[in-house]
Image (cartoon, rainbow, N blue to C red):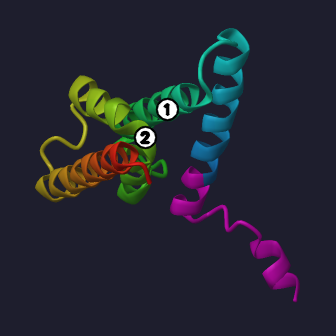
Amino acid sequence: MEKNAKAGLQWHDPYRRFSWLSLIGVLLLLGLIKFLFRELDWLLALIGAVNLVTFWAYGYDKAIAGSDRMRIPERVLLWLAFLGGSFGAVMGMWLFRHKTAKGSFRIKFAVVILLQLTLVGLYIYWRKIGW
């Protein structure tokens, strides 16, 4: 029983660790952005926070590449991009030259962008027809 209680969030799992850290970072930045720019729409503030965290994640992962430190899993980077941080991901990939040579990641990232464009297109279409 004690073994399960100690497992908790399983902090040693990089996916869970960086997912939680990303969520906390987004929430903190969202609060800061809304405090500094009170008139800003919540959705724009959220997208800004997600993009900043995503940009930071790409930079951090590039900075520790080749060291003994725990890397951010690719699926966390892709989820951050999918959840609204695609601009931050593109800027991080471009500025830090991170994940640009890895073909499998670029394909997955392209799928994320296509999914986002499809969802935005569907949203616009549904708004137009009045659903």
Dominant secondary structure of the residues highlighted in magenta in the image: helix
In the image, what residue occupies the spot 29% across and 26% down? 91
Name above or below for residue 28 compared with residue 104.
above
Name above or below for residue 8 compared with residue 121.
below
Q: Which residues are magenta?
A: 1-19
Amino acid of disc 1: Ile
Q: Quadrant of the C terminus?
A: bottom left
According to the image, label 2 marks what residue? 84
In the image, what residue occupies the spot 15% across and 56% down? 107
Please state the horizontal and vertical placement of residue 7, each as a whole percent of the image. 75, 74
According to the image, label 1 marks what residue? 47
What is the quadrant of residue 22 in the picture? top right
Check residue 119 for magenta coloring. no
Disc 2 vs disc 1: Cβ atoms closer than 8 Å?
yes
Amino acid of disc 2: Gly
- Depth order, front residue of 108/114: 114
In the image, what residue occupies the spot 60% across and 16% down? 40
> In the visual, does 131 lie left or right of 45?
left
Please state the horizontal and vertical placement of residue 90, each as a whole percent of the image. 26, 33
In the picture, the disc for residue 131 is none
Please state the horizontal and vertical placement of residue 26, each as a whole percent of the image. 60, 36
In this view, the residue farthest toward the bottom is 1
Check residue 11 for magenta coloring. yes
> In the visual, does 31 lie left or right of 48?
right
